[in-house]
Amino acid sequence: MFKKILIANRGEIALRIIRTCKEMNIKTVAVYSTADKDSLHVRFADEAVCIGPPSSAESYLSIPKIMAAVEITNADAVHPGYGFLAENADFAEICQEYGVKFIGPSPEMIRKMGDKVTAKDTMIKADVPVVPGSDGLVKDLKEAISTSEDIGYPVMIKATAGGGGKGMRIVRNTDEFEKQWNSARQEAKAAFGNDGIYVEKFVEEPRHIEIQIIGDQQGKVIHLSERDCSIQRRHQKLVEECPSPFMTDELREKMGAAAIKAGEAINYEGVGTVEFLVDKYRNFYFMEMNTRIQVEHCVTEEVIDHDLIKEQIKVAYGIPIDGDSYFPNMHAIECRINAEDPFNDFRPSPGNISSFHSAKGHGVRVDTHVYAGYSVPPFYDSMIAKLIVRAQTREEAITKMERALDEFIIEGIKTTIPFHKRLMKDERFRTGNFDTGFLNNFEMGEPEA
Ligand code: MV4
């Protein structure tokens, strides 16, 4: 097994990875920016290396600094977590050149799935359903319009380098095409330095349902059922659950098989997620593939009762998967607790946490790097904790989540806890009757006295 893993990340995921390494008798190296010196990931790692000032570009995103930390600590593997360098093919390639194992798929695979047109084309060849649309990139406005008139409005124009909704526009008719085309291209150029655009039929009121897969170096791919991530705000997920309240045994069978085909087609190694759009008739379409461990992996862990980071490290070392695809018979829900003010347009609320009491009890899990007295720095993602519950049924999971949210106390900063309390009481949420547009007209009301 690996002797020492350097964790090229911060926050709860860095701590999450350290915990599994300890249970596997693997030494750990934390890296940290000066803003993170008091974070628990630094305290609980066997060694810690300061890699720079607060700015991500000069710390967690700096490949030379991470590689220097690998060199001086003699780590034999790097775990990238999520975000930062997790889907940076150049970083995976540099690790390979230095003879240190990047815990994740090959640089080629990351590159292939990072370019959406290439990813979609790969899925078409693998017989995975995709949204009808242009054959690859459209070369100019004229071709974009004629393609759209063929598929029928409304359409969505998307950036091939896209992600997180950037460079994406709905177009409802030919008259408004030029305006949307120009603004999508400009946004894509600015965000990714790539203004390649493709066109798709717009899927109305879709759900976001993703399938967790894992592939080993021997070529076996299995799926670990789905997560419903439809509760999003401006492309930021706030709540995830497994199973999806919209799922049927038949649909899971079909989507699971499609996700396995997707993984097998590219000889996928590691944990990955195949994201689908699902329409109200339960047609499903490949959207993107994420080649990393995701924030919401915990809901899958809770229902399958396996440590996904451990499975990820094992396949990275070359150990074959033992086990089969999984069909859930428990229910798990995760609420992301962010340092944001839900009554004020989710404005970031960094600062000192004056008191912190975690929810506890049967079926309750909290993943966090923060504690009373900790100061949430303003430089990074605002997520400070994940509250995950598991129970026999969705109804019981919601009740347990309400109980857990009620006993979770965080003072000194604003958090998304009040949002989650209101969401759990919402009739549409409780009946599972929601799609990705759900939060567009969700009212927070007034704060409690
Ligand atoms: C779509 C779509 C409807 N039709 N594609 C949003 C992020 C990017 N990965 C893809 N996204 C969408 N693609 C077609 N053809 C609607 C969305 C979408 C969305 C998808 C998943 C979760 C939340 C969303 C919110 C708005 C739009």
Image (spheres, rainbow, N blue to C red):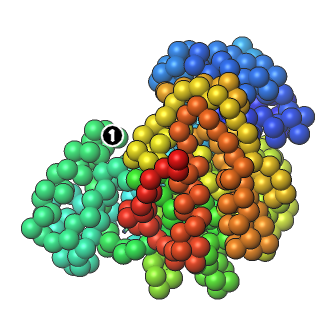
The residue shown at (88%, 39%) is: 24
**SS for callout 1:** helix
Residue at the spot 78% in from the left edge and 54% down from the top edge: 364
- Provide the residue designation for mark 1: 191
Q: In the shown orientation, is residue 136 left or right of residue 54?
A: left
Q: Position of residue 291 (x, y in %)?
A: 58, 50
Q: Quadrant of the N terminus?
A: top right
Q: How many marks?
A: 1
Looking at the image, residue 192 lies above or below residue 6: below
Residue at 22% across / 45% down in the picture?
A: 186
Q: Nearer the viewer, residue 133 or 275?
A: 275
Q: Is residue 324 above or below residue 68?
A: below
* Residue in the image at 70% along x and 29% along y: 372
Q: Position of residue 130 (x, y in %)?
A: 44, 72
* Residue behind label 1 places its C-beta within 8 angstroms of ligand 1: no
Relative depth, front residue between 189 and 370: 370
- Residue 393 visible: yes
Q: Residues within 10 Å of mark 1 (few under 14, many from 20)?
A: some
- For ligand 1, give the image quadrant: bottom left
Query: Is 32 situated left or right of 437 in this image?
Result: right
Outermost residue, front side: 449
Residue at the extreme left of the image, as rendered: 175
Residue 353 drawn above or below residue 440? above
Q: In the rendering, at what x and y percent does residue 47 appear? A: 78, 19
- Looking at the rendering, which quadrant does residue 429 occupy? bottom right
Amino acid type, callout 1: Ala
Between 109 and 381, the one nearer to me in the picture = 381
Tell me if residue 62 can be seen.
Answer: no
